Image (cartoon, rainbow, N blue to C red):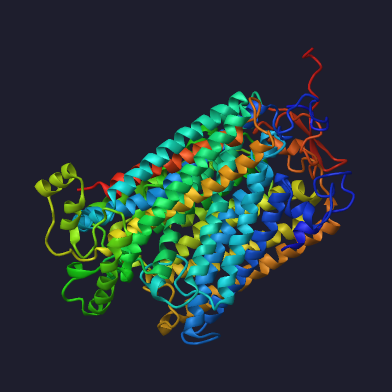
Amino acid sequence: MSTHDATAAPPAVGGENYLNCSHGFRSWIFTLDHKRIGVMYLASILSFFLLGGILALLIRTELLTPTRTLMSADDYNKVFTLHGAIMIFLFIIPGIPAALGNFVLPLMLGAKDVALPRLNLASYHLYLIGALIAVLSIVQGGVDAGWTFYAPYSTTTNTAVVTLTFGVFVLGFSSVFTGLNFIVTMHKMRPAGMGWFDMPLMLWALYATSIIQVLATPILGITMVLLIVERVMGIGIFDPALGGDPVLYQHFFWFYSHPAVYIMILPAMGIISEVISVFSRKHIFGYRAIAYSSIAIAAFSFLVWGHHMFTSGQSDLMNMIFSALTFSVSIPSAVKMFNWLSTMYKGSIRFDTPMIYALSFMFLFGIGGLTGLFLGSLATDVHLHDTYFVVAHFHYVMFGGTVIAFLAGLHYWWPKMFGRMYDEKWGRISAIIISVGFNITFFTQFVMGSQGMPRRYYAYVDKFEPYHVISSIGSYLMAAGFFMTAWYLVKSLYRGRPAPANPWGGASMEWQAASPPVLHNFTDEPVGGDPYDYSNQDYDPATGGYVLRKPEVSDR
Amino acid sequence: MSTPHEGRDEHAHPHLQHHFESMAQQYDSGKFGMWLFLVTEVLLFGGLFCAYAVYRANHPEIFAYAHQFLDKTLGGLNTLVLIVSSLTMAMAVRCAQLGQQRRLKQMLAATLLCACIFLGVKGVEYEHKWKHGLLWGTHYVPQGETVAPADAAGAATTAETTAAAAAAPADGGTTLPHAATGPQGLADHSQPGHGGASHGGHGPAGPAPRNVHLFFGIYFVMTGLHGIHVLAGMIAIVWLLRRSAAGEFGPEYFAPVDFVGLYWHLVDLIWIFLFPLLYLIH
């Protein structure tokens, strides 16, 4: 599943659609169509997911033995830095909003496009440019400062920090433009009759995400500028030798990067809200609570960055305030969790692939969220700081949360995007393999971390070897699951059963468009209504999809 | 929403994009987007203002000492120039709304001229700083007694720069004192009222505090980033001039002029904050 996606126009699925209405490289790279931009984003982020994944496997393989296995210690530092930077800035931040969000947002609004299509294209071009610059740093010999680029090491190491951070700076603009565009679209393009509380919860999640993208990313931009200026001109602002303050860098960096983890998780929660309801055949429970909790998470996200610096010499008072605020983020997160569980209660649950991923999300995100509380408590954090416990927690929320939800969304909207059904049996098998492999890989790291295994270490004490071996085996299992997924998804583009307009029985408006949609999205004016009301649709065995029940001819 | 397959309404404006229903919806969307973009700009500079606040709170003596090497007259002149440019920009927007093509072009050209003057004056200021070694980080090598006595490395360069400075007064028509003469020099050269206040209040005649270069680091990053924004604004205004030469703007369609105007006012506003924070502090 890589760049093939972009060019593979499935033939003869119900006549003309956005994939086959025009041909050639230029018709894609300069398109203003949000659907094509979404598909190009999807192909790009999946390519970088593959690259980041290979780097992850290299890390895990190196750690099979307590000493050298594959590479030198310097190379190891570069590999984990690139794994982090690529996965964060090139895959997971644009992942759900720019790829899936771009595709479904206007469709969910019944609109023809996002409000600012040229800005949307500019965002993608900036993404490509930023990605190329970031990848250029590999050619220049890599970067070994870690994805957080902490000063003063990042300002003194002789690796290609400037290239990579400049790439991140450009990628930041791409992210800002996507978020800005989504906010404007949701404000100005909602159809008459659709109020804020008639929107699907995916849109609430994207709205909250966009707010963070717009408000937090500029700080990353200026931080990267200062870091580059520091390195190139020696301005001294983060350099203690010149009277600068390296902890100020940490404040700046986390003022963006903590909200950024909510850029990653919020749209994932939006997907889960859709999938849980559709596959439980039951109206979402607590719509308003879920909608408000998205906004609450966005608001809290700006007030907790200090919990990354509990051991950096912050004052005790600051530590206590940040710790308390950190705990309060768990409230809106738990609100969502319990509402999803309540949605499933007495529902008619179908275990299709998206639902298996959604259930997996709740399990893994539950663990990830709860272990976050250990790290948010001051006393335990001193012990757990900079250990594998943090690595495991981060991967449980980011991978177990965001990536698993991304996979749920990818499978959920795949028929809409490409007009083909993937192989459901292999979908379920891979989903289970990935979830099991994930737990083997990262649960072990909780154990290691609590016993004191520091993160980012190349050589380690012998007693941790069994844990590292188990963890690496889990990562190979996960990789197998991903390659299976890639295989059946690519295969479906060519051999898949043509998808009906509404294969899952979803009630939000994107399911009223054809699969795949036509260039301007809807052939008939979409009918608005409650996005979680499944009572007025019938299953049509001929197409294998759901159709809206013809309204009684009584309105005239 | 009109039916997707229908062509655009016969009477639709040529600048109406296909996915909007009306020019009003298109204008509102663009304007809202522009405001959000300005929010991100404020936050971008916000990081720098934050750095400024942190360092000024931690090292007030550096700021009190170093700001006196900035030229208040030139800074004030630039403030005036930018405020005038904001006025001409606002008038350009008005002309576009009224369809006054000729005046629109004049106003845009006037704004562009102001921007050029601003950057020119800024260039003169930068040149003085460069000449006097008032730069950032390790490049901060001022002349004369402002060099800390212990700074052996600086001594050699001091000799050179003092020689260079001796030749400077002939070409320089500025009130800016040489770093060698220090803050007292500023007081002497300033207008009487100004100088008097400076004497009575706080003239820090003593030796330079440590790490003065931090102030100049912040000064150059903040004014430099602002200068880049002025340049970007100038490019946008040239683009507007080209489009207005083609007569594209009028009462029906003036959004680009309006949006660039908003941006220009923000650039102006940031300078309004930079000027007192860097030049006029005590």
Residue, x 36% and y 73% (percent of image)?
A: A452
Q: Residue furthest left?
A: B200
Residue, x 28% and y 48% (percent of image)?
A: B72
Q: Residue furthest front?
A: B170
Is residue A38 shown left or right of residue A11? left
Is residue A529 shown left or right of residue B279? right
Residue, x 43% and y 44% (percent of image)?
A: B42
- Does residue B4 appear anywhere in the picture? yes
Q: Quadrant of residue A544?
A: top right
- Does residue A202 appear anywhere in the picture? no
Q: Does residue B168 sit above or below A10 in this rendering?
A: below
Looking at the rendering, in which quadrant would you find the N terminus of chain A? bottom right
Residue nearest the observer in this picture, A234 or A29: A234
Residue A244 in picture, x, y percent from top left: 29, 65
Residue nearest the observer in this picture, A337 or B50: B50
Q: Quadrant of residue A340?
A: top right
Is residue A123 shown left or right of residue B141? right
Residue, x 37% and y 53% (percent of image)?
A: B48
Total labels drawn: 0
Looking at the rendering, in which quadrant would you find the C terminus of chain A? top right
Residue nearest the observer in this picture, A468 or A75: A75
Q: Does residue A427 sit above or below A272 in this rendering?
A: below
